[in-house]
């Protein structure tokens, strides 16, 4: 294949030059080269920095998603990519920048120490280090523990309608011009707010969170679960503090690994949302990935040479063997391949750029059509003939044996239910009678513990796999369980009503 | 007979976890007949500094893919990778790019 031949050609050239002396930068051709970035080009330090800074502005400018004056939340995990992103935003917003960026940043750090079993001293230490870094930037910052996920409202997983923003490029240009006019006329100093949320250790919450993470049996499910919960906390923080955009620090290498591991875990239908530049699944809060053009190597080099502070925080898969989880395996696979074939990551990245969703993700879609956990469109529609249906049918047949008896699972409308004949006081939230006792199904009284099978219809395929891996569904936060029950009641009611509607 | 070499080693990006969480090391390599190169340095590190899980740092006779090596703040690919001959006072930095984002 053409590409492989090109790479070997470059390799040979590289070796010859090294024998002759230090290579010169391919851009300015004057200074000595100090780093090789993807494509085999050797750059000197100054050209590298220029390229790096330019790429950031170009990615934001090309996509025209962030309007001037908008409040943007930077999700900083402490790792090199997000700290590099923070530095780029700082430089971009500074007064003497050429074509400076124009938005109002805020920073959020989500402390996942509880899920990873770190001691509270270690967490305090890390938080203190990060606070020092954030204070130096002068932007308002929020430090949120992941334990807060247990207290989130149900609105977190509902898609809210996006604020009216015209999508055509003409409007973007007029918005920028208006902003510049406004800035020139009123030279008001921007007030710097130092907002610090009081960060206190929450012991009982930490244990509940650890129980939840511990109920997942495999590391893959644990990682997926933590990612989902983290995203919920991010969206909730953005909504509650009035931010309309969130910037994530996923690098090109990260996204390439994410793409392949998502396909392996069954999230193929949502690839465009998970790895694209902008993620519109939540409606009013848009997730943006401006670092998706940078490889991990470029970021590491930039951070080292230009002294970008970052804090290393051990995660769930630190020091684990290669085969501990799907993410880990994919990561080591991509990295090993990249060492021999330097165009691996960029090929995967270019493929991901071409992905688009088939049906437009409309924010006015019925919430019941979205997955409960990942808020993407459900991909488990009853098509009749599909591989998924075959899997479900064989699963049902292997569980369902013999006649129905009270207490035995019964097939009602394609879902397994407990045939509990006792009628209890219906305690559905809004005081409505769920009406199921008359039909003969089970009452939705909250006394009954939620079963895994109950959640299935509200989840997309990959989230079903996560939930299947949990040993018990009760550990899930309340907002997820109550929303699941609500959707189930709605869909049952809809089915009943349908029988009376003349089509 | 080459004189003992003193080098400045740094580990970042999570690699320091394998070295007792110490990021900076000032080491002195013993004198030997021929010059020291990176290949031999890696063997030396594995024998003397690496405290645990060698497979997370070294793979075969080179570093694990995903670990960036900088010699005097320049990419080692430009310096000859494993065949670069170390000079006295060189700084070698190992940054793991596998973690973090």
Image (spheres, coloured by chain):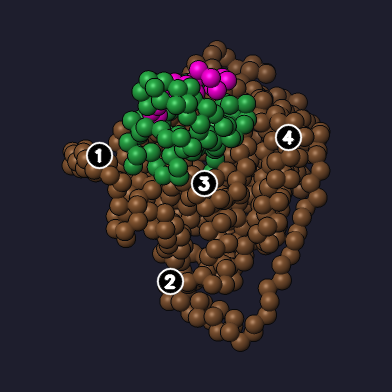
Q: CA distance from mark 2 to mark 1?
A: 53 Å
- Colour chosen for chain A: brown
Chain containing mark 4:
A
- Mark closest to the chain's N terminus, 4 or 2: 4
Distance, label 3 to label 4, CA atoms, is 24 Å
Disc number placed over residue A122 in the picture, else none? 4
> Do callouts 3 and 4 mark residues in contact (Cβ within 8 Å)?
no
Q: Is residue A135 above or below residue A467?
A: below
Label 4 SS? helix
Can residue A231 be seen here? The reply is no
Question: Label 2 belongs to which residue?
Answer: A168
Magenta residues: mostly which secondary structure?
A: helix
Position of the N terminus of chain B by quadrant: top left
SS of the residue under disc 1: helix
Disc 2 chain ID:
A
- Judge if badges 1 and 3 mark residues of a common chain: yes
- The residues tagged by marks 4 and 1 sit, at their Cα atoms, a distance apart of 48 Å
- Chain painted in green in the figure: B
Identify the magenta region.
B36-52
Image location of residue A422, percent across then percent down: 76, 26
Which of disc 3 and disc 2 is earlier in sequence? 2
What subunit carries mark 3? A
Residue that badge 3 annotates: A304
- Mark 4 and mark 1 in contact? Answer it, CB < 8 Å: no
Instruction: Say which residue label 1 marks.
Output: A19
A201 vs B17: above or below: below
């Amino acid at each position: 294949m053409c590409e492989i031949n090109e790479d070997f050609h470059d390799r040979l050239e590289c070796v010859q030059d090294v024998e002759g002396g230090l290579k010169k930068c391919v851009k300015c051709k004057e200074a000595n080269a100090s780093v090789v970035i993807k494509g085999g080009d050797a750059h000197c330090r100054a050209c590298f920095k220029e390229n790096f800074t330019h790429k950031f502005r170009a990615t934001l400018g090309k996509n025209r998603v962030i309007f001037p004056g908008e409040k943007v939340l930077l999700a900083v995990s402490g790792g090199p990519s997000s700290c590099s992103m923070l530095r780029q935003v700082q430089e971009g917003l500074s007064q003497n920048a050429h074509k400076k960026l124009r938005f109002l940043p805020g920073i959020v750090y989500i402390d996942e120490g509880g899920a990873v079993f770190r001691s509270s001293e270690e967490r305090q230490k890390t938080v203190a280090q990060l606070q020092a870094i954030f204070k130096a930037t002068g932007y308002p910052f929020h430090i949120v523990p992941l334990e807060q996920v247990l207290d989130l409202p149900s609105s977190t997983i509902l898609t809210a309608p996006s604020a009216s923003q015209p999508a055509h490029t003409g409007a973007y240009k007029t918005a920028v011009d208006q902003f510049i006019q406004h800035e020139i006329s009123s030279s008001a100093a921007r007030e710097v707010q130092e907002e610090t949320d009081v960060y206190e250790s929450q012991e009982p919450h930490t244990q509940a969170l650890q129980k939840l993470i511990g109920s997942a049996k495999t590391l893959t499910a644990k990682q997926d679960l933590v990612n989902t919960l983290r995203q919920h906390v991010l969206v909730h923080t953005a909504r509650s503090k009035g931010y309309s955009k969130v910037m994530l620090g996923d690098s090109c290498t990260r996204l390439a690994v994410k793409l392949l591991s998502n396909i392996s875990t069954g999230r193929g239908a949502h690839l465009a949302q998970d790895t694209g530049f902008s993620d519109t699944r939540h409606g009013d809060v848009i997730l943006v990935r401006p670092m998706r053009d940078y490889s991990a190597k470029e970021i590491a080099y930039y951070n080292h040479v230009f002294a970008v502070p970052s804090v290393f925080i051990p995660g769930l898969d630190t020091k684990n063997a290669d085969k501990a989880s799907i993410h880990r395996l994919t990561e080591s696979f991509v990295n090993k391949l990249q060492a021999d074939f330097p165009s691996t990551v960029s090929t995967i990245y270019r493929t991901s750029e071409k992905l688009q969703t088939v049906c437009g993700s409309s924010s006015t879609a019925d919430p019941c059509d979205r997955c409960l956990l990942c808020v993407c469109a459900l991909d488990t529609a009853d098509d009749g003939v599909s591989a998924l249906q075959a899997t479900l049918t064989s699963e049902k047949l292997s569980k369902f044996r013999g006649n129905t008896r009270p207490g035995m699972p019964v097939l009602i409308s394609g879902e397994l239910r407990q045939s509990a004949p006792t009628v209890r006081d219906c305690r559905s939230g809004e005081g409505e009678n769920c009406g199921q006792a008359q039909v003969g199904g089970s009452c939705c009284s909250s006394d009954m513990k939620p079963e895994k099978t109950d959640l299935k219809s509200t989840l997309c395929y990959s989230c079903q796999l996560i939930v299947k891996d949990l040993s018990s569904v009760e550990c899930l936060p309340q907002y997820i369980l109550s929303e699941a029950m609500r959707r189930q009641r709605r869909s049952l009611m809809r089915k009943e009503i349908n029988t009376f509607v003349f089509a | 007979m080459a004189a003992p070499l003193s080098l400045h080693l740094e580990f970042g990006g999570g690699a320091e976890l394998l070295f007792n969480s110490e990021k900076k090391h000032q080491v002195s390599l013993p004198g030997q007949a021929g010059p020291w190169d990176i290949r031999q340095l890696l063997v030396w590190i594995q024998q003397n500094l690496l405290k645990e899980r060698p497979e997370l740092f070294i793979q075969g006779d080179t570093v694990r893919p995903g670990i960036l090596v900088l010699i005097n703040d320049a990419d080692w690919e430009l310096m000859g990778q494993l065949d670069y001959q170390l000079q006295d006072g060189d700084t070698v930095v190992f940054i793991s790019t596998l973690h973090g984002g």
